[in-house]
């Protein structure tokens, strides 16, 4: 039986990945600071462990841990925590992996399209350099920490994930609330790109990278057709049969959110060049079918029918 060791397994992506691996017959251990709380949210069969040192060696290690950048204002203290929460876990994980008699075949380590910084409408594949911004420098340090595992012969895939769309959690679940009340609309100019990916394709892509020994290096986990913020909100409104006339000025977002507003007012036109060249095929490569699957057809956020 194959075994996976996961950090960040109680998060949105992690829970879906755990369920997918378990359904495929994998043994899954999840590193978590609170094993009791984790047991209440993890899929049945996933085993919480208190630390990487307490975990048994695994065939695949998936590192998704890190404080959410969008959960509040970017104070200097919070910036330090966002950085340390990623680097601390990644370094500890690589140290433990290095001590195993048989290292894992692969380490899939999280990163984000924020690596590229605010680049306007430029098309960004994995060959593009990083920018000189907080979230970019954070991703660079995170990826460098993960690459330490290469020193003990581990194949490392660095996944630069975009905005993961799911009905029950994540960015989309937060966005649809104002739309339900007819108050949805775009942010700032609406010209900023949103590099989105359906949660099923996010999990399928991670599984693809686990299964294909030829894959290593950086991979943008984004759908092939990123949309601007204005395009995204227009399609979402149509799928939900709601208007999309509201507008939140950039200055207002900056006043309310501070530096964190930068995430909402800039974006990356990132494309999954490396993933597609490796042979991955998306289930949802266009926005409207993805949103229809998640929130259309008169579904509420739990997938139940409701009258709109």
Image (tube, rainbow, N blue to C red):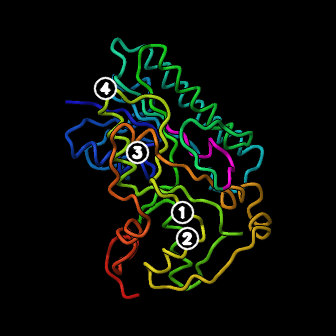
Q: Nearer the viewer, mark 4 or mark 3?
A: 4
Local secondary structure at mark 4: loop
Direction from residue 265 to residue 123 in the image, left or right: left
Q: Nearer the viewer, mark 4 or mark 1?
A: 1
Local secondary structure at mark 1: strand
Question: What residue is shown with label 4?
Answer: 59
Between residues 293 and 214, which one lies in front from this camera angle?
214
Q: Which residues are magenta?
A: 110-120
Question: What residue is shown with label 3?
Answer: 36
Separation of residues labelled 1 and 3 (CA atoms): 40 Å
Separation of residues labelled 4 and 3 (CA atoms): 25 Å
Q: Mark 4 vs mark 3: which is more N-terminal?
A: 3
Tell me the crowding category of disc 4: few under 14, some 14 to 19, or many 20 or more residues within 10 angstroms, Cα based. some
Question: What residue is shown with label 1?
Answer: 227
Image position of 216 with respect to 262: above or below: above
Residue name at image x 35 percent, y 51 percent: 16
Separation of residues labelled 2 and 4 (CA atoms): 41 Å
Separation of residues labelled 3 and 2 (CA atoms): 42 Å
Say if the magenta span includes residue 265.
Answer: no
Local secondary structure at mark 2: helix
Local secondary structure at mark 3: helix
Separation of residues labelled 1 and 2 (CA atoms): 6 Å
Residue name at image x 40 percent, y 73 percent: 295
Which label belongs to residue 231? 2
Which label belongs to residue 128? none
Across and down, in percent, residue 222 comes to 47, 50
Residue 266 image-quadrant placement: bottom right
């Amino acid at each position: 039986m194959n075994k996976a060791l996961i950090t960040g397994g109680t998060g949105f992506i992690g829970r879906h990945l755990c369920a997918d691996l378990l359904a495929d017959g994998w043994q899954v251990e999840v590193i978590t600071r609170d094993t009791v709380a984790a047991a209440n949210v993890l899929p049945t069969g996933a085993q919480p462990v208190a630390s990487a040192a307490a975990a048994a060696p695994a065939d695949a290690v998936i590192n998704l841990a890190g404080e959410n950048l969008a959960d509040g204002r970017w104070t200097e203290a919070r910036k330090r925590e966002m950085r340390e929460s990623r680097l601390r876990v990644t370094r500890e994980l690589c140290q433990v992996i290095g001590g195993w008699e048989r290292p894992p075949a692969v380490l899939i380590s999280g990163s984000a399209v924020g690596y590229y910084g605010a680049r306007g409408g430029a098309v960004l594949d994995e060959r593009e350099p990083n920018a000189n911004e907080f979230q970019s420098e954070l991703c660079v340090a995170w990826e460098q920490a993960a690459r330490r595992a290469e020193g003990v012969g581990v194949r490392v895939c660095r996944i630069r994930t975009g905005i993961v769309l799911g009905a029950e959690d994540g960015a989309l679940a937060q966005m649809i609330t104002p739309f339900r009340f007819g108050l949805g609309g775009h942010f700032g100019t609406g010209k900023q790109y949103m590099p989105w990916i359906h949660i099923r394709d996010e999990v399928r892509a991670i599984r693809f990278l686990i299964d294909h020994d030829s894959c290593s290096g950086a991979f943008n986990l984004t759908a092939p057709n990123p949309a601007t913020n204005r395009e995204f909100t227009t399609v979402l409104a149509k799928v939900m049969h709601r208007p999309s006339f509201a507008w939140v000025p950039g200055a207002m977002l900056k006043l309310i959110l501070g530096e964190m507003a930068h995430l909402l007012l800039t974006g990356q036109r990132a494309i999954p060049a490396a993933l597609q060249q490796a042979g991955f095929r998306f289930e949802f490569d266009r926005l409207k079918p993805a949103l229809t699957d998640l929130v259309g057809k008169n579904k509420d956020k739990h997938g139940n029918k409701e009258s709109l």
